[in-house]
Image: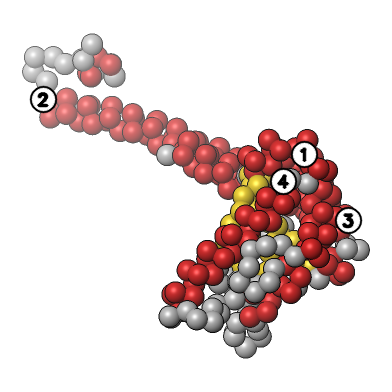
Amino acid sequence: MNVNEMFGVRRGKHDDPWSSVSDLMSGLMIIFMFVAIAYMTSVQQGKKKIENIVILWDKTQEAIYRDLYNEFKDDLPKWRASLNKETLSIRFEEPSVYFETGSDILKDEFKKILKEFFPRYLNRLRKHRENIAEVRIEGHTSSEWVDAKNELDAYFRNMELSQSRTRSVLQYCLTLPAVSYDIPWMRDTITANGLSSSKPILTSDGREDKSQSRRVEFRVRTDAEKRIVTILEEIR
């Protein structure tokens, strides 16, 4: 069957050939119209799915924050720690408690805090696991390094130190007897991330607060971003 027959166009022997071209173009326009409608429908459906994910993300974010807040609200002040609702991050803010200067060996005081904190933290995240993409242990430093050749040298030395420190925190947390039953999930989900001085804490006048910049954070990432990317790929 040719295009003319497909769209019900019959030609006689005296038909104008340009009329056939016109009929063909009309048929193609109809095809393009259906393709456009299908695409727009797909985009609208994708948009709706993304809106639903954003709503779910907001509810999940609020639920995780509320659970963490209720669990640790009385402990955060004594640990010199804080909970950020927007990033779902528990930030330990007293650098003198964690490590000796230039060392990745956990101090006994920080081990005591982690032993009290981590099993309870894991327990609070349990019911949200299907919506959690990653739990990040982040190590941050100031931009200082005493004998660094230049700023870049200091950055890379701090990168190595911060990565080594977060690995020490992760190793200690995963070997706590109270969480031994959960090793498979922790190995799949919890990561150690040394960020050097890339995310400093700034004072009100925009200068680096070197003491506050030296910190350890436990941050929850939900899977909302992954779901949205999947939908966008389906639309394309």
Q: Where the C terminus falls, by quadrant?
A: top left
Point out the tag, 1 or 4, that comes first from the N-terminus. 4
From the viewer's perspective, is the residue at label 2 or at label 4 nearer?
4
Residue at 78 percent of width and 59 percent of height: 111
* Real-space Cα separation, disc 2 to disc 4, in angstroms: 82 Å
Give the class, few, some or many, for how many residues have Cα within 10 Å of label 3's Cα (few <14, many ≥20).
few
* Real-space Cα separation, disc 1 to disc 3, in angstroms: 24 Å
Residue at 88 percent of width and 63 percent of height: 75
Point out the tag, 1 or 3, that comes first from the N-terminus. 3
| Residue, disc 1 | 180
| Residue, disc 3 | 70
Kind of residue indicated by mark 1 = Ser
In the picture, the disc for residue 16 is: 2
Kind of residue indicated by mark 2 = Asp
Q: Position of residue 204 (x, y in %)?
A: 66, 85
The correct choice, above or below, for 74 with respect to 178 in the image is: below
